[in-house]
Amino acid sequence: MAGFAVCGSRESTNSPIHQFTNPPIRVDIQHERDKLLLITNRSRAIPPKSEVLQGTLDLMVLKTLDTLGSMHGYGIAQRIQQVSSQLLQLNQGTLYPALLRLEQKGWIAAKWGVSDNNRRAKFYSLTRAGRRQLEREAQDWKRIVEMMGRVLGPEGAP
């Protein structure tokens, strides 16, 4: 992905030094399946949205903890971003309420500890109930994927 800043309209065309009245517009050029996308916004670039269906984040967190064991929130977010090939980036306002919800449901346990950089952090681990929930949710997703494959057809296109 290449990013460019494009300046706004000029204040005066007669001036030897052109001053711009509008802030720069950020333009990102992205290649996606043989299409060239130009995404613009006056204040910031707009990344392509990766919307997560409700409940999917819970499944991703549970699977991450099942695979890697006890982790702090930032590590969980980094792992999900890595596994999604950077397509999904979780912010604290999304992840930490989900972790609290999972803890309240008894699917994960939280314990204070010290991170790799000697900072106090809450570490999350999967409980037995969380492991059972992970199995149920994984089966549900497999059924959904199978059903959507049938709806979309053999090519996976509408």
Image (cartoon, rainbow, N blue to C red):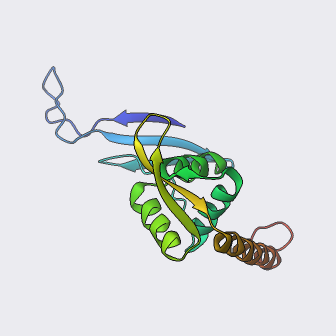
Identify the residue shown where x is 30% and y is 48%: 42
Q: In which quarter of the image is the N terminus?
A: top right
The answer to whether residue 51 is visible is no
**Percent from the top left, x then y, of residue 48?**
52, 54
Q: Which of 16 and 128 is in front in this view?
A: 128
Q: Quadrant of the C terminus?
A: bottom right
**Percent from the top left, x then y, of residue 3?**
45, 35
Residue lying furthest top: 16
The answer to whether residue 130 is visible is yes
Q: Nearer the viewer, residue 12 or 99?
A: 99
Position of 140 relative to 68 (above/below)? below
Residue lying furthest right: 154
User: Which picture quadrant has residue 55?
Assistant: bottom right
Q: Which of 79 and 45 is in front in this view?
A: 79
Identify the residue shown where x is 54% and y is 47%: 75
Residue 119 vs residue 148: left or right?
left
**Percent from the top left, x then y, of residue 111?**
49, 57
Residue 33 vs residue 38: left or right?
right
Residue 153 vs residue 31: left or right?
right
Position of 118 relative to 91 (above/below)? above
Identify the residue shown where x is 63% and y is 57%: 65
User: Which picture quadrant has residue 106?
Assistant: bottom right
Identify the residue shown where x is 87% and y is 70%: 154
Count of numbered marks: 0
Residue 125 vs residue 34: left or right?
left
